[in-house]
Structures are given as structure tokens and as C-alpha cells.
Amino acid sequence: MRPTSESPGRSISAPSAASPIISLEDAMRVLEETSRTFHIPIVRLPDRLREAVASAYLCLRAIDEVEDHPRLDNSAKSGLLRRISLLLQVQRSVGTFDHEGFSTEVAGYHDDLPEVTRRVGEWACLAPDSIAPRIWDATAAMADRMAHWAADGWRVITEADLDRYTFGVAGAVGLMLSDLWAWHDGTQTDRMHAIGFGRGLQAVNILRNRAEDLAHGKDFFPRHWREADVQVYARRNLSLADDYARSLPSGPALNFCKLPLTLAHRTLDALERGQAKLSRDEVFQIMREVGYL
């Protein structure tokens, strides 16, 4: 077991031929390169919670990069995602984690996959031992669900299909975050609101990335839905996200949620005005409003 007071540059697991030395500093570098939007609130979290949330984000982003990969066909995506899921399901501890197995799985795609995906096994061991299995569970479940969507060709026909997709890729992330808050300091949340938090953010992403998704053969709009219908769907779920944030006491959970939630609302407003995305100045203004600048 690792001690609870660890500095950012410490080794997460004992070095061996199959167990790399992982530094939080290096993980935060990859996180910043992957998403400045989430790097900013994560880097401000207390140490152990920062490790857990960074581990979760990097693991899930690793899965997302496979889902979105432009050069892998759906069969390859589905197979790789299922194998990653199965590997996570048989891990017993951080100390005995099968790093070699994960390296073997991604070796055949080394030239195609980004660093965040190639190192998914390392990110899985970044969190403290007492919460790491919850992150493995969430990552394995998302990988399995995304494998299904890849095999099915991303077919969204009905609103129920959209609900299934947004739950699998984001709503379940809200549930995991609620568990991380409770693990850290006992913060309790409404789990239905947590699902809405994830779904709302994902619905905004679907609207923002509409053209790119269509170019890659993905259409997340239910049949006969227009942008206005998805905007209604997004606002309905963002209303639950607002309830989620309002219920949080002052502290790290609330501080974390402020930025992505405010960005989602303002992005949706901008899309309705015909903007493709928020301007850099608008993003900086939001960061000032939520206290990050």
C-alpha cells in the first residue's frame, strides 16, 4: 500500500520490468496536452483527489481516443475496446497490475494511437489503491459500451438510443465522479442529477462536433431530429446538471464542476446564435467568472 501523503513527483508503483514508474507530474503533462478544459479544474484539486480524478479522466480519454480514431475501422475499435475492458476486469491490485498485458494489447496500434491511449495501464494505477478499482470499473464499462457502439456502427435512431449513448459515454462518468467526491470527503449527491450532468455536457459536445462526426460516419441525432431538438435535450439535462452543482457544498467537488458546466451553457448559447464555438476571449471571461483567473 502507498502512503497517503505523497509528493507530485513520487513513484506510484514499485519499479520492475513490467511495472513502470509513474509520476503525477508526467500525468498532468499528458492531461494538459489532452484537454486544457479539464486540466485547469483537476490541477486545483487536493492531492489524493487530484490523483483519482486525473486517473479517471486519462483512462476515459484513452477509451474516447479509440472511439474517435479516424484510421481504425469499427471492427478494430470494437475488438481493442473489448480486450481493454476484459483486462481491467481481471486486475487485483495496483501492485500486481498487468502492465505488460496492456502494453501487448496496444502494441499492434502503437503508430496509430496517441500517448494517452498507449499508456492507459499507467493511468489506471495513478489513483490511490482505495479508489482505483472504482475507476477500473468505470473504464471497463465504458470500453465495453463503446465496443458495442462501434460494432453497431453508431446507430442512433430514437431518443432512447441517444439516452443510451450519452449515459454510456458521459452519464456514467457523472456517477463515478459522485463516488470520488464521497470517497474523498463524504460529499453526497443526487445520482440522477449526476447522470444529467454527464448527459448535458455530452449533448453539447454532440452539437459542437456535428460536422466532424458526420464526416466520420457518425450521426448522434435521432431520426427526424434537428439541431433545435438536440438543444432542447441538452438544456433539459443541463438543468439537472445545475441542480447537481447547486447541491454541492463549497469545496473541491463544486470547484471542479463550475468550469465545465459554465462552458457547456455558454457554448450552447453560442451555437444557438450561430457561432461554431466560443472565442478565446469568451473562454477567458468564463474562467475569470468562475474564479480560475
Image (spheres, helix red, strand yellow):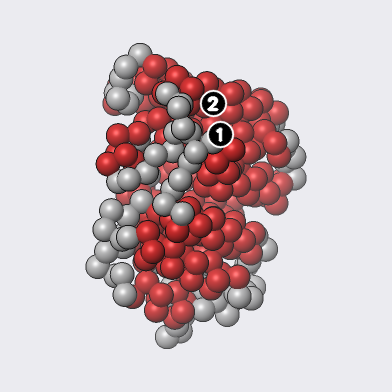
- In depth, the one of 17 and 272 nearer the eye is 272
Assess whether mark 2 and mark 1 are in contact (beta carbons under 8 angstroms). yes
- For badge 2, the amino acid type reads Tyr
The picture places residue 240, in percent across and down from the top left corner, at 64, 27
**Is residue 279 placed above or below 87 in the rendered structure?**
above
- For label 1, the crowd category at 10 Å Cα-Cα, with few meaning under 14, some 14 to 19 and many 20 or more, is some
The picture places residue 114, in percent across and down from the top left corner, at 31, 60
Q: Is residue 170 left or right of residue 274?
A: right
**Is residue 224 placed above or below 2 in the rendered structure?**
above
**Is residue 6 placed above or below 37 in the rendered structure?**
below
- In depth, the one of 169 and 179 nearer the eye is 169
- For badge 1, the amino acid type reads Glu
Q: Secondary structure at mark 1?
A: helix
- In depth, the one of 253 and 72 nearer the eye is 72
**Is residue 203 placed above or below 143 in the rendered structure?**
above
Quadrant position of residue 90: bottom right
The picture places residue 45, in percent across and down from the top left corner, at 54, 44
Tell me the residue at 43%/68% (across/down): 79
- For label 2, the crowd category at 10 Å Cα-Cα, with few meaning under 14, some 14 to 19 and many 20 or more, is some
Residue located beneath label 1 in the image? 159
Residue located beneath label 2 in the image? 233
Tell me the residue at 65%/45% (across/down): 175
Q: Nearer the viewer, mark 1 or mark 2?
A: 1
Tell me the residue at 67%/63% (across/down): 130
Q: Dividing the image into 4 quarters, which one contains the N terminus?
A: bottom right
Q: Is residue 42 left or right of residue 2?
A: left
Q: Secondary structure at mark 2?
A: helix
Q: Is residue 278 left or right of residue 62?
A: left
